[in-house]
Image: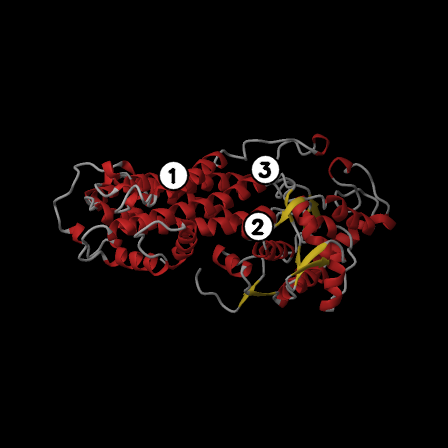
Amino acid sequence: MQKQSPVIIINGESLTLERADAIAYGTAIKLPSSIKQRIDASHNFVRQIAKEKTPVYGINTGFGAFANTNISPNQLRKLQINILRSHASGYGPPLSIPETRLMMALRLNVLVQGYTGVSYELCQALHRLIQADIYPIVPEYGSVGASGDLIPLAHLALPLIGEGLVNFRQAIMPAADALKIAGIKPIILKEKEGLSLINGTQGMLAIGGLALIKARRLYLYADKITALTYEAQKASISPLHPFIHEIRHQTGQINSARQILEELEGSPLLTTEQHSQIQYPYSLRCAPQIHGASRDAIDYSCGIIEKELNAVTDNPLVFCEIEKILSGGNFHGQPLALAFDFAAMAVSNLANVSDRRLEVLLNPHMSGLPAFLTKHGGINSGYMATQYLSASLVNENKILSNPACTDSIPGNGGIEDFVSMGMTSARKLKTIVDHAKVVLAIELMAAAQAIDLQSFKHLGEGTGKTYRTIRAAVPMLTQDRILSHDIEKAVAALDHL
């Protein structure tokens, strides 16, 4: 993560993935004074419309299939409370605090743009919860990705009115208790404000966005680890020659080949012409092509998600400058669902090819090294069982790589007849990224072990650093020990490559 300023401004215009990551992990946010005027203008227009008899969706009507049901003026505020209560129907373990914190900030980033019709007081109230570290308990399951993340966002909004559960000071408690301790009063929702809190893509955006940030790091780790595997196999660097990659014109492939080669700078591999094989397995020889394709897919997905960080995803939308309230579908999660599913396949492939390089290292017929990288096979099993773990994670990744975005299950009396399932796509991506990191860590351990079993005078500048990083966390395997401890340390070491 890049170094950020102490405070990030929430103005609806300037969020990036790096800033979103910083917010998720605790960087403070600030509301600029310049937003108040446009928010007030939008809110005043909504209140004016609410007094009129003409039905306007989301303001003086029911929701979804109840859109044709008019609501009397004295019930408009009750309507906003009811939509939060009725839609807070999630189930399962809560989202993590970083995911929840980012989700709150992203929803605030929508509200401050002045197109939702909420009051400035509501924006301040949501900001106060973030400042006080009062994090709503948001169950993992419930969103179908249209109209956005209704259920997760309803749970996110409940504490504003003093309802639901929150995580506060490392304890789960009723929101009313946390607000009282923090000296914060619950708010009274005004016209449209309940709907404006829950209509959007910020649930899937927070979960999938944080996973994408990790995915972008993984393809960098994958190139570094592959370079060390090149060293361990004393493989020919011919497949890395820039001439090969430049004439294919694929950006990710070019960059991946360049990075692997740069990691090997100073290595004897760059000067030797003696190699044990004429052609090496695809997992080594085609690493730039495979990694590069994943790079491009992940970078594309990041571009889509970065646009969504500053998007307005409410419905209806308030355009007070032309005195119109327009009903549309910006809440629909299809752009995100496709991006997350694409990234999921890309990350799954990074793990898959890493597992194949692990096979190269562990198989004596391919590596020329002792089986499973242990000197005393039989009494010791070496890294044999790590391949089982790798295979189990790769297998699950392949199953999770099946797209969620192509499966629409209609709801709401047929009104929501095509939904994105973007939250499922985001959650799958998160799991695949976590699994892939473990698989890469196992390859890293095996590559370092293969280095230790041979006579190496020195490594490349980059590969030497990678080797020293893993060896600072995990020592050489001289005899069998509990490897799960080593794997945990190796996973943590990846963040220091």
What residue is pinned by disc 1? 352
Q: Position of residue 322 (x, y in %)?
A: 68, 50
Q: Amino acid at mark 3?
A: Met
- In the drawing, what numbered circle is on residue 421? 3
Does residue 152 appear left or right of residue 481 in this picture? right
Q: Amino acid at mark 1?
A: Asn
Q: Is residue 497 visible?
A: yes
Which mark is nearer the camera, 1 or 2?
1
Which mark is nearer the camera, 3 or 2?
3
Q: Position of residue 440 (x, y in %)?
A: 38, 47
**Quick one: 437 or 147, which is closer to the camera?**
437
Query: The residue tagged with tag 1: helix, strand or loop?
Result: helix
Residue drawn at point x = 44 percent, y = 48 percent: 215
Report the quarter where the N terminus lies: bottom left
What residue is pinned by disc 2? 311
Query: The residue tagged with tag 2: helix, strand or loop?
Result: loop
Q: Residues within 10 Å of mark 1 (few under 14, many from 20)?
A: many
Q: Amino acid at mark 2?
A: Ala
Query: The residue tagged with tag 3: helix, strand or loop?
Result: loop
The disc, 1 or 2, on the residue closer to the chain's N-terminal end is: 2
Q: How many marks?
A: 3
For the residues labelled 3 and 1, the Cα–Cα distance comes to 25 Å
